[in-house]
Image (tube, helix red, strand yellow):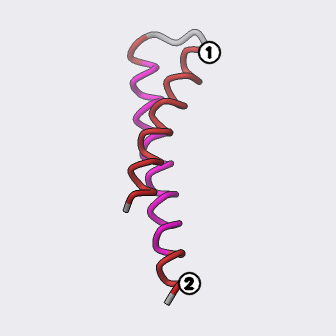
Amino acid sequence: MLLALIGLVIGALLGALVARRRKGSKTDMLQYAAVFAILFALAGLFLTIFILRASG
């Protein structure tokens, strides 16, 4: 579960950074942050499930 939370935070920060680089407004940064946070959290969740299944 921790990997999903880490992915959520990293995704939000990365999404906001990408939107800022593309000269987006505040709402663009919020939208990019939300989308990236969801994607990275899902990736962390799947990684957590894979690790738990592989370990036993």
- Rate crowding at label 2 as few (under 14), some (14 to 19) or many (20 or more) other CA atoms within 10 Å: few
Going by the numbered disc 1, the residue's amino acid type is: Arg
Give the residue at x 54% y 31%: 14
| As drawn, 20 above or below 30 | above
Most frequent secondary structure within the magenta stretch: helix
Question: Does dot 1 land on a helix, a strand or a loop?
Answer: loop
| As drawn, 47 above or below 5 | below
- Queried whether the magenta region covers residue 38, the answer comes back as yes
**30 vs 47, nearest the viewer:** 47
Q: Which residues are magenta?
A: 28-49
Report whether 41 appears left or right of 22. Answer: left
Give the residue at x 49% y 39%: 11
Place residue 17 in its image quadrant. top right
Going by the numbered disc 2, the residue's amino acid type is: Ala
Q: How many marks?
A: 2
Q: Which residue is the site of mark 1?
A: 22
Q: Position of residue 27 (x, y in %)?
A: 38, 17
Report whether 2 appears left or right of 24. Answer: left
| As drawn, 19 above or below 40 | above
* Mark number displayed over residue 33: none
Q: Position of residue 51 (x, y in %)?
A: 53, 75
- Queried whether the magenta region covers residue 31, the answer comes back as yes
Q: Position of residue 37 (x, y in %)?
A: 44, 41
Q: Please identify, in this view, whether the residue under mark 1 or under mark 2 is nearer the observer.
A: 2
Compute the Cα span from label 1 to label 2.
40 Å
Give the residue at x 53% y 66%: 47
Q: Which residue is the site of mark 2?
A: 54
